Each structure stands twice: as C-alpha cells, then as structure tokens.
Image (cartoon, rainbow, N blue to C red):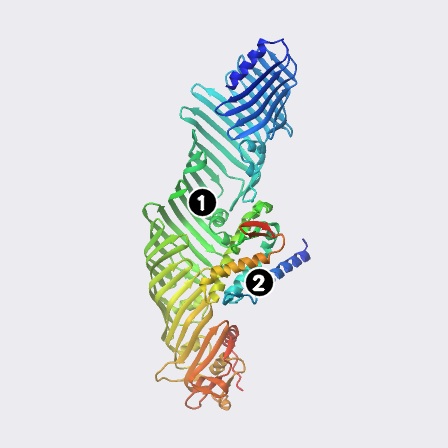
C-alpha cells in the first residue's frame, strides 16, 4: 500500500515535472502492520526543499503524532530519489535526526543514513538483490524501549552491531550480531534492576514455510543484576535455538553456562500474545552446592537463613512446568550436605534421588551419611519415602543416635498452605546414658534411654508425642509423657512434658553431680514442664524420699549443698554443734518442691510438719546423730538458684559449718 | 564516618530500639501482658536489636517500610547498591521471622496462643506509631512517608 502511494506520488510528480510545486494529501493509509493518517507531501522543483508530514503514524498499539521529514535538497533524477541533509522528527522517538536518503526505484536499491545527537547512527543499505544491511552505532536502548513498550523498565545502554536481511528462494534469512554496552534497567521498586551490563549477541534466523527457525547466543560479559531475590553477576552464556511461528515462540533447545554448574539445558513454548510460558522443561547437571547454594538456593528458599546456611556436595535437577504448574521434579543428590552454622545442625552427606510427579506415586531413596544436632551425632541411615502429590509416606526409617536409634514408623505427612501435617509413631531404641550424658555435657552416668511413642502427630512447627520416653538411670527410671515439641530448630523452641521419676539411687546421683554423698532413694515428678530454648520456664516439681527400708545417710557436704537450694541465709541446720563432729548423719526423709513461674521458684519441703518460724523441712533427721535441714526462703529466683547450684557443684571447697 | 560518629549513631539507634521495646512497658494487652518477659522473648529482642543497626538506614532511606501487618517489607530497593539488595531482603526475611516468633511467644507466655493475631495487630500499630518521621509506613493500605 505504501509502495503504491509512493509510486502514485512519483507518477504525479513526474507527470507535472517542471510545472512547479506539487502537493499531495492523503486522508488515511492502512496496512496490517501500520496506519498512516493525514499524509501530506509537498515537493518543490529539482534541488528545492521537500517535506513529508504525517499527522499520525501507528504501529500496533503505539502511535506518534506529527512525524515530519524535511529535505532542504530534494532531487529526483531518472527515478532516483535523494534527500540530502534532511531532518527527521518523530516526537518522543527521533528528535533532530539528520537523514540522508538515496533510493533507486529502478533496481529497488538505496541507502538511508540517520544521525542522532549523541553519536547515535543507523545506516541501512538496500541492495538490488533484495538484501538489506542495517548497521547500528551507539544506538540508545532507551529509544528502542519506547518502540516496544518497555518504559517501566527504564532500560539504558548502547547497541552497536549489524543486522542483515537476505531474501531466499523460499523465504528469507536474518543475521544479527552486535554488542550491548553500559546496559541496564531499573523497575521503580528496585526489585528488578541491572547496571553496567555488557552483552555479546549473535542471532540467526531463517524463514521457511513453517515460520522462522532461529538460533542464537548471548554472552553476558560485564555488569551485575538483581532479580529479586537473586543477585547475579556477569558470566552466564546462553545458546538457544527454536522456531517462531505465528504467536508461538518455541525454544527447542537452550543451554546455559553458569559458574558452579556443569550444564543447564531447557526447552520451552512461549506464547507471545500475551507473553506467557506455556510449557517449560529444564535440567541442571552437577550443580556445585557450595556455589549455587548461597547464591541461588538460600536467597530463594530460605532468605532469613542466608547468612547461616552452608552447603556442600552436588545436586542435579530436572523439572517440567505446564501452564505455570509444576508437573514433574527430579532431584539427584551426590554427597550433598546442609548445615546451619550457629545451631550446629547438619545433615549429610546425602546421596540419592527424589522423583516427584504431580499425578503419580513415586519413591524417593536417600542415603544419609549422618547428621549432627548440637553435640548429638546421628549415624548413617537410608530413607525411603513414597511421594504422592503433596503427600509423603515413610514406612520405617531408623536414624542411629549414639549407640541406639530413633525409629520413625508409618509416618504419613501432607503439605498444604500452612505447612506439614501428619502422624506416625516413634520408637527410641536404647541409647546408653553414658554416651548421651557425654554428648549433652552432663556428668558421667550409667543407664539407658528408650521410648515408645505410638502417637506421633505433626502440625506446622509442632510435634506431639503420645506415649512414654523412659530413661533407666541411677537404678531407677525417669518417664516423660505428653511430650510436645514446638519449633525444635527455631529461636523460640519449646518442649512440654510431664516427667515422673521412681527410685533413683541418691548415692549414684549425688556422686555423678559431685553433690556430696547421700544414700537412699527418691521419687520425683515434674509436671507441666515447659522448656523454652531448652531452659525450664515453668513446672511443678517435687522430690521425695522413696518409700521402703534402706540405709539413709547424708554427708556434711550434701547438707551444705541442699541448704543452698533453700536460699541464702535461709537454712538452718539443727544440732549445729554436732554437724562439725560427724561426716555423715542419719535422716528419715528428704523432700523439696519447686513451682516455677515467671522466673521464680516457690519452694516447699516435707509437708507433714511445719518447721519453726514458717520454715519447711527439706531433710528431716532420724537416728543418731539426727539432723534437720530447714528452708526459710519460699521464693527463690530461678536463675540465681541455678547459678548457686552450679557454683556448689563446681566448688571442691569443704563446707563451712556454722 | 569516623569511629566516634559511628559509635554515636549506633548508640542512637540502640537507644531508639530500647525506647521502642521498653515503650511497651505497662501496656496491657486485653487481659494479658504484652511486655511479658521470658528467656525466649529476651533472646528475640536481642536478636532484633542487633539487626536494627543494619535495618535503620534502610528504614531511613525508604528501602524498607513498616507494614500494617506487623512485618517489615522491602519497598523501594532502588537506593540500595545492587550487590546489597539480596542482603537487604535477607534482613527483612530474618526480621519478619523474629517478629512472627515474638508475637507467637508473647501470646504463649500469656498462656493464650490464640492471642497471636491480636498481639501482632497491637505491635503493628505501635511500630508505626513509633516510627521516625520520614520512614515508610503502610496506612489504610497505602505506603506513605511518615
């Protein structure tokens, strides 16, 4: 249509050549690609000024008003059109652009040179054989951004290069080679931005019957970018090939070179109206977790722990996404390790595969080399899990802990928007207390810990355990029931439990904790125990001599230490005069209780008889020499109590008896 | 910034966060105490205080704002160097994790875990009330400079 109009224009002009000025006005010129409204052409005589003005010029949804080309020296010689030292104005796109135009209508060749302020240049050569070569120099990306509606990206940079179009017998070929310098973009919120970007670009495309077959390579050689939440630096190179057919861009194969990854490959189908990824498949081979973990995985999946997460080993991955929804994911770990630096929590090395299908049941198999939680080392174990959509089922997994094991059975978990939910059962196969005490930094002790917890329930941030955890220790046992664990690895970890102890041998217990020497046995309960960050914040505890006949003796040192539990200056030992004379004393009962609330321990002792002066008996004497220990301080600061107890235990000094 | 200026700036921020946190003293939440202190709450406050020295310049520049839901949000990172935007995002994520734990913990310490949403709403209002002039805050769904 345009060509037709131009020919009409030339014919009209040539028909009246020499007859003075010519003026042509066209109301509207429509083409599938563009629309011209209000076209006015004024031509003078040979060598005189000419002007082309368009009131509105539209391509797609973009349009420009008042487009003009003024040629102070316009010539038409034997169907050769020349516009020398002209000026092109497309408001908002080309301001003050010098234009030189040379068109030979006989062999359809010509040359167009555009020069813009700031040393931007576009030179287009049209050859008689139909080839078109465009050379770009210093072309502003911001200017191109106006063409393709990328204003919100605030793109900058300079493009240089060459675009070559060649017609072929059955279509056409396009080759693009060029560079981008000082490139960048910045969205208003700063969440997508790049600076100082340099790119080497090579593209080639061939038009056939089925559309454009294309291939290209883009190398990012300078600059940095932040694509929320990832910070990226120059280095990646992408090579891709595919087809553009109508409004569908097919990426048949793409290969990305990225530091720390042996290979990344992808293919995709992308709709262009509107732009949307219809389908995507990608694979990542041998990603070095020490490199990609802190750069990509932590910011994307655990941004709050970015500074603390450590990675090692390798992972390979593959995934498919259809219409934005993941349909398959495959992960293969090779000696992969994960740890949280400040919690001493680690897992690995981990080797195995996790296949997942949105619509099918699969089996994941992982060999875990071990782990560590604080000082507690976990041994190697194999985890086999059935994956089904958002569900994970584990029939049985035995995690070695010291010389025993934590066995999880019939674990059925499901993930929803709030997190993981599920149930199962847990068994702790006997763990020797000697090893556990060593790992926990406790004094040496013998015995074993075991547990049968048939009702394990998991909710987001919460694990509840019905059943009992039993520790046989000091010839008696401790039993913890109603166990509930909240956010075990979080800052605000909480443990709730009821603890009952029966027939603990005081001789062994006091020896283990260097508490002096007491013979006899005690029962105890700690009800409503709450540990926050593994420290007690609430409980109702009571320790009482076990019923039965057995020797009951208490040493001077133990008397002193028990006194310390009652508060400073608040304990009196009766028959003080005798205390210094004997190493041990007989006693009838020992009893002490503490109700911990808000950091204060409300203390009490044996409740069968009030001691003088509102005191309470902690040790009630019996035999010869007899000795009573009486507490007077009923409110003791818990932290102070613990400090005092630790000092007492740590001190090897002989007790001072007054 | 010399060492003395830095120290003064840090003291200023530390003072501010102390005022902010202690400012809740005496504030009674429903029948509970929003200023209740437990080892966990103390640890969370300490963690947040330490982080505040890094977050304060981001509040001042408007990169990070105080949201109406009791969280902080990365709003306009354009003033932050590209290489540090990831760190700013990590700070925001860590702060929000601590804040969520703080609200949960205060509700729990009051013996009413179900109060968490109310504790969060109360804190959200207070954070915004006590924000310094110029900080970005979310009010009636819109982000504005205080």
**The C terminus of chain A lies in quadrant:** bottom right
Q: In this view of the protein, which residue sits in the foreground, A414 or A409?
A: A414
Task: Tell me the element at label 2.
Answer: helix
Q: How many labels does the image show?
A: 2
The correct choice, above or below, for A302 with respect to A477 in the image is above
Q: How crowded is mark 1: few (under 14 residues within 10 Å), some or many (20 or more)?
A: many
Check residue A287 in the rendering and tell me which mark sits there, or answer none. Answer: 1
Of the pair A365 and A211, the residue shown nearer to us: A211
In the picture, the disc for residue A276 is: none
Q: Residues within 10 Å of mark 2 (few under 14, many from 20)?
A: some
Using the rendered image, report if marks 2 and 1 lie on a common chain: no
Report if residue A493 is visible in the image: no
Where residue A175 sits in the image (x, y, percent)?
Answer: 50, 26
Q: Can residue B67 be spotted in the picture? A: yes
Q: Position of residue A61 (x, y in %)?
A: 51, 31
Residue in the foreground of this view, choosing between A110 and A353: A110
The residue at which mark 2 appears reads as: B21
Q: Mark 2 lies on which chain?
A: B
- For the residue labelled by badge 1, is the local secondary structure a helix, a strand or a loop? strand
The residue drawn where x is 57% and y is 45% is B82
Image side of residue B135 versus residue A556, left or right:
right
> Decide: marks 2, 1 in contact (CB < 8 A)?
no
The chain containing the residue under callout 1 comes to A
């Amino acid at each position: 249509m345009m060509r037709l109009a131009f020919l009409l224009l030339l014919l009209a002009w040539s028909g009246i050549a020499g007859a003075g000025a010519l003026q042509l006005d066209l109301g509207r010129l429509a083409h599938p690609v563009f629309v011209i409204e209000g076209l006015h052409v004024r031509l003078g005589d040979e060598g005189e000024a000419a002007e082309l003005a368009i009131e509105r010029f539209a391509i797609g949804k973009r349009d420009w008003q008042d487009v003009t080309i003024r040629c102070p020296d316009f010539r038409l010689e034997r169907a050769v059109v020349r516009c020398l030292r002209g000026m092109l104005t497309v408001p908002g796109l080309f301001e003050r652009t010098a234009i030189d135009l040379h068109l030979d209508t006989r062999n359809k060749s010509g040359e167009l040179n555009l020069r813009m302020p700031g040393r931007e240049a576009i030179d287009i050569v049209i050859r008689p054989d139909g080839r078109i070569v465009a050379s770009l120099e210093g072309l502003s990306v911001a200017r191109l951004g106006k063409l393709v509606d990328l204003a919100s990206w605030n793109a900058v940079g300079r493009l240089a290069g060459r675009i070559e179009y060649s017609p072929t017998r059955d279509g056409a070929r396009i080759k693009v080679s060029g560079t981008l310098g000082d490139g960048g973009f910045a969205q208003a919120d700063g969440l997508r931005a790049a600076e100082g970007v340099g790119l080497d670009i090579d593209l080639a495309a061939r038009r056939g019957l089925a559309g454009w077959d294309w291939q290209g390579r883009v190398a990012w050689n300078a600059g940095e970018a932040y694509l929320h939440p990832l910070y990226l630096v120059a280095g990646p190179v992408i090579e891709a090939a595919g087809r553009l057919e109508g409004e569908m861009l097919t990426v048949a194969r793409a290969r990305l070179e990225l530091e720390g990854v042996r290979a990344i490959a992808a293919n995709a189908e992308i709709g262009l109206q509107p732009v949307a990824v219809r389908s995507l498949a990608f694979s990542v081979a041998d990603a070095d977790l020490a490199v990609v973990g802190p750069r990509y995985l932590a910011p994307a999946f655990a941004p709050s722990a970015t500074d603390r997460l450590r990675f090692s080993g390798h992972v390979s991955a593959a995934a498919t996404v259809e219409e934005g929804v993941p349909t398959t994911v495959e992960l293969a770990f090779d000696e992969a390790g994960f740890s949280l630096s400040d919690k001493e929590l680690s897992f690995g090395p981990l080797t195995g595969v996790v296949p997942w299908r949105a619509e099918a049941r699969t089996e994941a198999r992982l060999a875990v080399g071990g782990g560590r939680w604080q000082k507690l080392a976990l041994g190697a174990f194999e985890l086999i899990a059935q994956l089904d959509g958002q569900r994970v089922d584990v029939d049985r997994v035995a995690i070695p802990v010291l010389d025993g094991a934590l066995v999880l059975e019939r674990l059925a978990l499901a993930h929803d928007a709030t997190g993981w939910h599920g149930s199962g059962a847990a068994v702790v196969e006997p763990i020797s207390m000697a090893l556990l005490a060593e790992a926990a930094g406790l004094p040496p002790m013998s015995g074993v810990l075991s547990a049968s917890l048939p009702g394990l329930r998991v909710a987001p941030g919460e694990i509840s355990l019905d059943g009992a955890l039993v520790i046989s220790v000091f010839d008696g046992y401790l039993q913890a029931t109603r166990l509930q664990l909240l956010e075990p690895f979080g800052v605000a970890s909480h443990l709730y439990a009821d603890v009952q102890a029966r027939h603990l041998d005081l001789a062994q217990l006091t020896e283990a904790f260097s508490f002096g020497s007491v013979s006899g046995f005690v029962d105890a309960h700690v009800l409503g125990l709450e540990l926050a960050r593994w420290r007690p914040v609430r409980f109702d505890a009571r320790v009482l001599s076990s019923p039965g006949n057995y020797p009951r003796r208490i040493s001077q040192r133990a008397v002193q230490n028990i006194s310390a539990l009652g508060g400073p200056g608040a304990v009196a030992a009766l028959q003080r005069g005798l205390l210094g004379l004997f190493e041990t004393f007989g006693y009838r009962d020992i009893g002490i209780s503490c109700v911990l609330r808000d950091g204060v321990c409300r203390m009490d002792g044996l409740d069968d008889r009030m001691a003088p002066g509102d005191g309470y008996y902690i040790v009630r004497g019996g035999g010869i020499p007899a000795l009573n220990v009486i507490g007077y301080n009923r409110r003791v600061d818990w932290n102070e109590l613990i400090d005092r107890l630790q000092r007492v235990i740590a001190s090897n000094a002989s007790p001072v008896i007054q | 910034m010399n060492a003395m200026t830095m120290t003064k700036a840090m003291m200023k921020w530390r003072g501010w966060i102390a005022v902010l946190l202690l400012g809740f003293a005496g504030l009674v939440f429903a029948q509970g105490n929003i200023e209740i202190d437990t080892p966990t709450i103390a640890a969370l406050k300490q963690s947040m205080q330490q982080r505040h020295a890094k977050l304060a310049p981001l509040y001042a520049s408007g990169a990070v704002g105080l949201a109406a839901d009791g969280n902080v949000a990365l709003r306009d990172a354009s003033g932050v160097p590209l290489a540090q935007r990831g760190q700013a995002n990590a700070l925001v994520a860590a702060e929000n994790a601590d804040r969520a734990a703080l609200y949960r913990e205060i509700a729990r310490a009051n013996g009413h875990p179900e109060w968490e949403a109310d504790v969060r709403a109360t804190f959200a209002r207070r954070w915004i009330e006590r924000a310094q002039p110029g900080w970005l805050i979310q009010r009636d769904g819109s982000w504005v400079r205080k």
